[in-house]
Image (cartoon, helix red, strand yellow):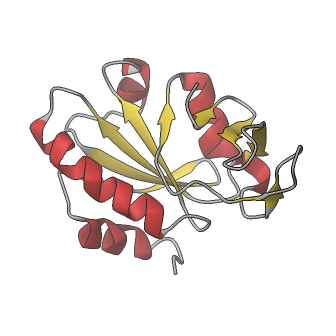
Amino acid sequence: MNAMEADNRGLLITCPKCGQRNRLKYEALQRTFHCGKCQTELHAPGIPVDVTSDLVFDALVSRSALPVLVDFWAPWCGPCKMVAPEVLKVANETAGHLLVAKVNTEEVPSLAQRFRVTAIPTMALFKNGIEVARQAGAMPAPAIRKFIEHDVAVS
């Protein structure tokens, strides 16, 4: 089982101290969480969340207390492979202020169709379930941060 998974109610995170699975509800991602078993403080993820279904995507973007940056990508896409480590950097740097999600358009093509993603990689920024910005093309981490800074206060 992965250290982090997403479902329609929140993020399932494994406690690094005791191994207990804990749910971080989307609505409360700006709060501090503690493991239900050992009370270790659990932090918002510093890695991208893999979105595996429409149901998970809809719950995540509509209920997240944090803005959500979505990277629409495909495994055969060279620029997508080049931007993946940059997206990881942004996820790590903005943990607790922004949630970064990745949508594999080959595994969940309905989302690419629904959001009219015609070029990949494409980054879309969502606040309160509404897409507020979009940018197509591979970007280094500083350009991704610049893209999001217009719509999100990220420290």
Question: Residue at position x 46%, y 47% from top?
Answer: 48
Does the rendering let one see residue 134? Answer: no
| Residue 96 rendering spot, x and y as whole percentages | 62, 65
Question: Residue at position x 19%, y 38% from top?
Answer: 119
Question: Residue at position x 64%, y 59% from top?
Answer: 66
**Image-quadrant location for residue 8:** top right
Quadrant of the image containing the N terminus: top right
Q: Nearer the viewer, residue 70 or 83?
A: 83
Does residue 90 appear left or right of residue 17 in this picture?
left
| Residue 34 rendering spot, x and y as whole percentages | 83, 55
Marks counted in the figure total 0
Question: Residue at position x 23%, y 27% from top?
Answer: 75
Q: Which of 142 and 150 is in front in this view?
A: 142
Does residue 18 lie above or below 51 as drawn? below
Q: Which of 33 and 14 is in front in this view?
A: 14
**Image-quadrant location for residue 78:** top left
Does the rendering let one see residue 115? Answer: yes
| Residue 26 rendering spot, x and y as whole percentages | 72, 47
Does residue 126 lie above or below 117 as drawn? below
| Residue 44 rendering spot, x and y as whole percentages | 64, 57
Q: Residue at the left extreme? A: 78
